[in-house]
Image (tube, rainbow, N blue to C red):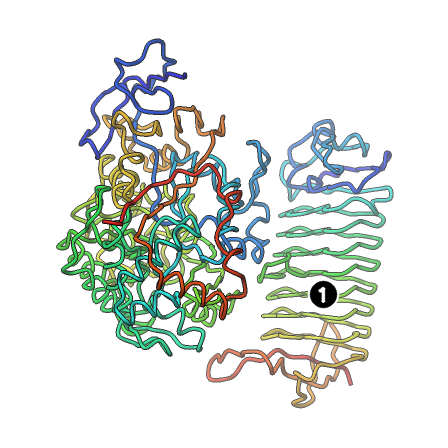
Amino acid sequence: MSELLIRNGFVFDPLQGIKGNRMDIGVKDGKIVETSALKNPKTIDAAGMTVMAGGVDIHSHVVGPKVNVGRLFRPEDKLFKSPLKRCSRMEMGFSVPSTFKTGYDYARMGYVFVNEAAMPPLHSPHVHEEIRDTPIIDNAAMPVFGNNWFTLEYLKNNEIENNAAYTAWLLRATRGFGIKVVNPGGSEAWGWGLNCVNIHDPVPYFDITPAEIVKGLIETNEHLGLPHSVHLHCNNLGNPGNYTDTLESLKLAEGYAPKNNFGREQVLHLTHLQFHSYGGDSWGNFESRAKDVMDYVNAHENITIDMGQVTLDETTTMTADGPFEHHLCSLNHLKWANVDVELETAAGVVPYIYSPKVKVCTIQWAVGLELALLAKDPMRTFVTTDHPNAGPFTRYPQVITWLMSRAARDATMKTFKWLDKTIDATSIDSIDRELSLYEIAQMTRAGPAKALGVSNTYGGLAPGMDADIAVYALNPESMPSDPAEIEKAFARCAWLVKDGVVTVRDGEVVAEPAKRTVWVDVKVPENAQVQRDIYEHFLRHYSVKLDNYSLFEEHLHNPRVIEVDATE
Amino acid sequence: MKTVILTLTNPSELLLEGQSITPDNFAGKKAAEIAALDVWEGKQKSPLGKYFTVAGDGGATAAETKIVLRGDCTRVKRIGQQMTAGEIVIEGNADMYIGGWMKGGKIHVKGNVDSFSGIGMEGGELIVDGNAGSHLGSSPRGEWRGMQGGLIRVAGSVGNDTATFINGGTIIIGGDADIHISTHGEGGTVVVKGNAKGRVGGQMVKGDIYVYGTIENPLPGFSMVGEVEQEVDGETARFAHHIGDLGERHPVAKGKTVYANLYTRI
C-alpha cells in the first residue's frame, strides 16, 4: 500500500530515548517501519524541522452530555468565533467547540489521541455518538466510578473481586477505557445537598469515605491489570488550603505497586493538579503550594499528574464534581447547569473568566506552570488545560511556549494587574527553567501514552507502532528568539501523518483518515453475585432496563479493543 | 468628513445581510472598491454594488466617513454592526440588528428599525425617529453582558425585552414599551416616556428605570421607598421611588445594600 519517508528531521522520541538526532522515519501501510523496508516511498522533506510522534492528550472533555450542555447553554461562545468553512465540516465555538472543530484543531496541533476524561455510564451511547462525529483523532472515554452505587456498596464491604467484576462489566457495557474518579463520594453526597471536602468525610447513607473509595479502586484496578491506572480528580477541588487534602489523597497510593502488561508504572494518576495545590485559608491570602505537592510527586514513582494549566481565557467549566460547580456559580453569579445521573454521578456547568486583572486567576496561572517546571520527571507530568475547565485545548501551544521560554512567561506576567502579589504568593518568578523539546515530547506524547498504557501504539516512533507523526517547523539548532514563533509552530504543525495518511499540511487539514474508538475489554471469571446485583438494581432503581443500557454495536465506531485477561 | 451615498436600486429577494456597511469597512476605499465589498443574501455572496449604487468615496479613517442610505432598507439587516466611529444616516426604515455590537460613532435612522437593534452595544449613539422592534439594546442570546455603554434614543414605541442584562449606557424611549424591561439588569438607565406593559425590572440587581406613564402589571418584587425629584433627559420631575428586585441577590457596597431603582412619575 502507501509508503512514506520523512527525511532528515530532528527526531524526538522519549520512548526510544532519541534526543533530536537527524533521522529518517519510514511509514508503510499505516505503521512505522525501518527505512530499509521501503521500496518506492513518497518523501516529506523535514530538514530543519522537529519530528515527534502524534500528540496524546491524557485528560480532556471533548465529547458527551456535559460538553453538549456547554454547547447548548453558551451560544455566545460561538458569536463571531466560527471560522468560514475550510474543511469538509463547519467549525464552531471557542471554549466548547463543535465535534468537527475539536477534531480539526487537535489535528492541526499534531495530536492524534484524546482521552475523554469523564463518561457518565448511563449516557455512554451519546458519548460514542459524539466520538463518531469527531473527525481524525482517536478517542477513548473513561466511565466515572467514584460515586457509583455499585462501587460504593462493594467497596464498603471490601469486596474487591465483586467490584472488579462489576468494573469489567461496566467497561464493556459502556465501551469504556478505564477507571475515572471525580470527587469520590462528594458528588453522591451532593444528592443530599452535601459534599465530601475531606477524604475522611463519610458519604451519606453509604457510610464509606473517599479514602476508602480511592484505595478500593486502586486495588480493583491492579487486580484487573488495566492499561491505565485509577484517574483521580480528588476531593476539595479549587478551594484555598486544599493542598493538604491533595497530599492526603496522593498518600493513598503508598504501598501499591503497578501490576499490568502495558508498561504502565503508576497506580494513581492525579489530574488537573493545578486546581488542587492551593494554600491559604481564604481568597484574600490564597497562595501556591505547588512546591509542597511536587516535592511529594517527585519522590513517589507510582504517581503521575497532569497540569490543568489556566490559560487566562473566557471559558466554560464542566465537571462531574456537582457541588463544586454550585460553589463556583455562587462565586461568579453566572449561569449554572446541574444534572443528576441516577445511581452513577452528577455534573455541573458554569462559564468562567480567568482574567489577568484578577489576583486569584493569575496565581492559578502560576501554580500550573510551577507544577510542570518543578517536575523532576517529565515522563510523569503532562500538559493539559483540563479542557475546557482551565482553558481551551487550543491553548496547548501557548502552554508549551510558557514552559519553554522564560521570556514568554515574563511577557504574560507584565499584563497582570496584581503582579507583585502574584509573585509573592507563588515561586514562579524565581524559576528560570526552560524546558527542552525533548521534555515537551515527554510531557505531550511519550509520557501520557505510557501512563495510559498505550505506548505500544501511540506516543512513539519505533517500528511497528501506528504511523502517527507530527512535524513542527522548529529547528532545535536555531530556536527562534521570539517565543511567539514557538507558539505558532506548535499551533499549526507543518505536517501531521495519521495512520500513514498525510492529514495536515502547512497547518491545514488536507485529509480525514478514519478515526478509532479505543476501549478496554476485560475478561473476568463468571460472578453470579454481581450479575444478580446488576439485575436487581436495574429492576428496582434504574429508569432504563438492563437490555437498553449497554451500548448497541451500532453506537461504536471503528473500535480498537485492548484485551485484558483477568481470569488467572 | 467624506460622504458615501448608497441608493438601494435593486432590492434583494431574500433579506440582505449588510454587516459590511460600516464606516470602518468603507474607510480608505474608493466608490468602486466599496461596491465590490461582500454582502450575503441567504447563502449567496454578492458584491454590494449588485443591490446599491455607490456614490462618493470613503474618508481616510472611519471617523471621517459618513454613509447615507437611500431607498427602502426595510429588508437590509446589520447596518453599522460592530462600527467603531463615523456616521450612518438611514433615510427610511431598516431591518434587524442595526447598530449591533456598536462601539462608537453615530447611527441616525429616520424611519423604523426591527428587532435586536443596538444589541450588545458598547458605545456610540443610535437614534431612531420611528419605532423599534423587540430586544432593543439587549444582550445577544446566551450572553450575560448586555449593553455596556452608549445611547439609544427611540422617538416611537418599542417591543418586548428591551435592555436585557443591561449594565451600562442609556436607552430613552419616547413612546410605549412592551413587556420586560432591563431583565437581569446590572446597571445602566432606561427611560420610558410613555406606558410600560409589565414585568419591568425583573431579576434586576442594579441600575435605573424611569417610567413616565403607567405600568400595567407592576412586579411584586419592587417596593416603594419614597418620593424624589430627579433630572431626566434635561427636565426635572417628581417620581415615586421603588427598589428591587427583592427576590434577587443584592451586593453590599460601602456598607449599603445595592438595589435597582424604579422611578414612576407622579
Q: Which residue is mark 1?
A: B162
Q: How many numbered callouts? A: 1
Tell me if A61 is positioned left or right of A266 in this view: right
Residue at (79%, 49%) from the top-left corner?
B95
| Camera-side residue of B58 and A374 | A374
Image coordinates of residue A191 in percent, x first then y, are 45, 74
Give the answer, above or below, for where B164 lies relative to A167. below
Give the answer, above or below, for where A568 lies relative to A343. above
> Which amino acid is tagged 1?
Thr
Q: Callout 1: residue from which chain?
A: B
Image coordinates of residue A161 in percent, x first then y, are 27, 60
| Camera-side residue of A363 and A66 | A66
Residue at (44%, 25%) from the top-left corner?
A505
Quadrant of res A53: top left
Q: Secondary structure at mark 1?
A: loop
- The residue lying furthest to the top in this view is A40
Tell me if A496 is positioned left or right of A404 in this view: right
| Camera-side residue of A165 and B12 | A165
Tell me if A534 is positioned left or right of A18 in this view: right
| Camera-side residue of B4 and A478 | A478
- The residue lying furthest to the bottom in this view is B226
Residue at (64%, 79%) from the top-left corner?
B261
Label 1 Cα neighbours within 10 Å, binned few <14 / some 14-19 / many ≥20? many
Specify whether residue A238 is in view. no
Image coordinates of residue A113 in percent, x first then y, are 38, 39
